[in-house]
Amino acid sequence: MSTFAAETATPPDPRRWLSLFVLLIANFMNLIDVTIVNVALPSMRESLGATDSQIEWVVAAYILAFALGLLPFGRLGDIVGRTTLFLWGVAGFTAASALCGLAPNIEFLIVARIIQGLAGAMMTPQVLAIATVTFPPQERGQAFSLFGLSAGLASVCGPILGGVLISANLFGLEWQPIFLVNIPVGIAAVVAGWFLIPRLPGHAELKNDYVGIVLFGLGIVMLVFPIVEGRAYDWAPWIFAMMAAGIVLIALFVFWTRNRAKDGQPQLLNFDLITNRQFMFGAFVTTVFASGIPGMFMVISLLLQGGFGFTPLESGLTNTPFSVGVLIASAIAGRFGSHYLRSRLALSGALLVIGIGWMHFYIEGVTDMIDHWALLPPLLIAGVGLGLGFSSLFQLVLANVPPRDAGSGSGALQAFQQVGGALGVAIIGQIFFTNLGNAFAAGSAPHAAFSHASALALWYVVGSFALVLLMAPLFRRPKPPAYGQGAPAQPALVEV
């Protein structure tokens, strides 16, 4: 009997739509956390007395921990059971949110953000896997469409909810409620998930590549840490030595993975993907594409609130057109399916260059005040560009991956997406804080200093998307039959 026939012959779980609701709530809680934190950064900086690099780490630590946890926790879900690991992930995310909300100092908050990122990586790979098994093939399209909708809603609601919670200053807690609000939601999700989500057994005979996890994780951390902290240590020689060591560790990871593949042992990243030039080219483009947005919104939040006195709610509302653009474009892109992928990616890069370039020139010319209405058109255009780009990029990369590697390829791309975000925060933060410090040292007024530093930081974002625009035609034209035979690409969960 074929796999499809076996699936359709098995009666679907009657609780599947209720369990899907639990999965969506948990996923929504994870996605909304990113945008809420961006709005809260200036408040955190002031109340905790954080340095420039520490504020960068509040964002980068979560993204980096999430990125490094995606692949190993995806495999661990196969070993111990998807439902079990999902529930542990939600519980861990809830507990870490409580630690973030109760953090007495910035160092404690950064450590709590690392735990929160690891917990998010623990639950995220299980979400789509559980939905795939729970729903019969004829219902999966409808179920997966709800994940895209929830991601879009999270990107729209995050800045507004963050602004409302911080401006309300509930119980005099300032920014802490943005994390504490996760506690009742997370507890409800764990309890409901325990009763509603079917138990999916694990496969104890499977193994994880723990040496590969350590090599890859240390390599990425030793590349990101020097970029974030280099300015604080005046670019001492050990900073560059650490970067070199990071490159060596990544090279060792590749050699280790090759040897594991020769012996037929499990690999953290399938070696067939490492030797697939089209996939690795796509992974590079994904890293570049994902590097711009998280750092950009960190800078914009600091510009609006720290430089021009916007309230958190005003800052969140100002950024909302971008999220609306992502939501609109994601809905439109779904109608094109797998058609015009290279053209859509090139159009995405062009729209992002236009929108963020427009923003750059506006911010560069600001003197006394920022008109939030003037930011609406460029943010909306850039949001449409991002919404078009992620779906087409994931499909385009996976279209050139053999069907047997489609699942691991999708998971690896999501990891590269997050690594790109962490690198972007580090690079954009360096540009922004270095030029801000130089401007203040030269005697610039706060408005001029923030505007100049922000405009310079946005040049990196414009350049990254210009590079994507140039590289889009270099992708091999997808072959519909090969793509159609493989597992469908998992939807990219856009975080802004």
Image: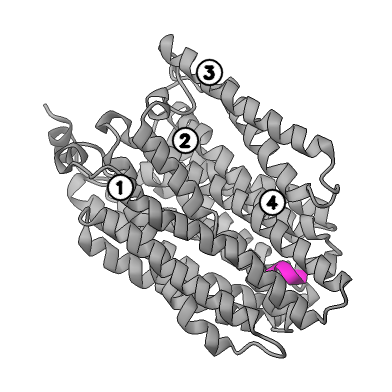
Write down the residue under mark 2. Answer: 74
**Is any part of residue 317 visible from this angle?**
yes
Write down the residue under mark 1. Answer: 396
Quadrant hosting residue 58: bottom right
Spot occupied by residue 470 in the image (x, y as percentages of width and height): 39, 54
User: Which amino acid type is marked by label 2?
Assistant: Gly
Q: Sequence-wise, which precedes: disc 1 or disc 2?
A: 2
Q: Sequence-wise, which precedes: disc 3 or disc 4?
A: 4
Q: Nearer the viewer, residue 6 or 325?
A: 325
Identified at 30% across, 47% down, the residue is 396
Q: Sequence-wise, which precedes: disc 3 or disc 1?
A: 3
Write down the residue under mark 4. Answer: 113
Callout 4: helix, strand or loop? Answer: helix
Spot occupied by residue 105 in the image (x, y as percentages of width and height): 85, 57
Callout 3: helix, strand or loop? Answer: helix
- Quote the CA–CA distance across marks 3 and 1: 27 Å
Identified at 23% across, 37% down, the residue is 486
In the rendered image of this protein, does residue 258 appear above or below residue 147?
above
- Closer mark to the observer between disc 3 and disc 2: 3
User: Which amino acid type is marked by label 3?
Assistant: Phe
Spot occupied by residue 313 in the image (x, y as percentages of width and height): 63, 81
- Closer mark to the observer between disc 1 and disc 2: 1
Write down the residue under mark 3. Answer: 255
Check if residue 32 falls in the magenta segment. no
User: Which amino acid type is marked by label 4?
Assistant: Arg
How many C-alpha atoms fall within 10 Å of the one at disc 4: few (<14), some, or many (≥20)? Answer: many
Q: Nearer the viewer, residue 105 or 415?
A: 415
In the rendered image of this protein, does residue 311 appear above or below residue 437?
below
Check if residue 40 falls in the magenta segment. yes
Write down the region rendered in magenta. 39-43
In the rendered image of this protein, does residue 249 appear above or below residue 59?
above
